[in-house]
Image (cartoon, rainbow, N blue to C red):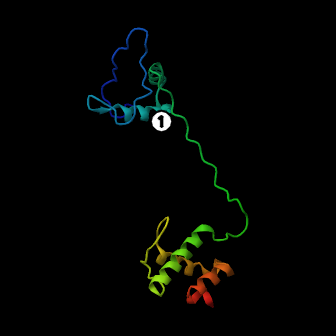
Amino acid sequence: MDGGLAAPLRLPRPAPGRSARLTTVVPGATRHGKDIGRWLAAQRRNWGRLNAEQQHRLAELGVKKAPRARKTAAKTTASSGPRTGGDAFHKGLQALAQYVAREGGMPGRSAVEKLPDGPHRVGIWMGNQKARRDRLDAAQLGALAELGVDWAAG
């Protein structure tokens, strides 16, 4: 695979006692207008597609097959059972309380409240809570009803 390099890659001869290595060439490194960094990365990635001679020549320059990407383990939750709402619910509740205290009513969908840790889209959060109200526990529904959310009261 030449990856777009029509002419063979020729490196300057190393000084006596030193060897040429391509281990530090990164994508974006160019020689005579060709991106040899991208070409080298493609050779490492597609090592199995290269013939034995190509692999041997690259190995002489210190190029090795790219390591296989590891698959990450699936995240596991610390607790089992239904979710308790956690920080996201409490942040949304804090933003709603702040909005109600300032405006005196419920936010529209586009309402954004500024919390100490950054902006919170309280209007979208309210819509999500309403859509998922069958999954909210009694304490969460009670907290929403306390702030004047009519659908949470009954």
Q: Position of residue 151 (x, y in %)?
A: 58, 88
x 53%, y 80%: residue: 97
Residue in the foreground of this view, choosing between 128 and 84: 84
Residue in the foreground of this view, choosing between 75 and 47: 75
Dot 1 crowding, Cα within 10 Å, few <14, some 14–19, many 20+: some
Q: Is residue 154 left or right of residue 103?
A: right
Q: On the image, which quarter does residue 19 sit in?
A: top left
Q: Quadrant of the C terminus?
A: bottom right
x 64%, y 53%: residue: 74
Q: How many marks?
A: 1
Q: Is residue 134 in view? A: yes
State the residue position of label 1: 45
37 vs 77: above or below: above
Q: Is residue 91 left or right of residue 81?
A: left
Identify the amino acid type marked 1: Arg
114 vs 73: above or below: below
Q: Quadrant of the N terminus?
A: top left
Q: On the image, which quarter does residue 147 sit in?
A: bottom right
x 56%, y 76%: residue: 93
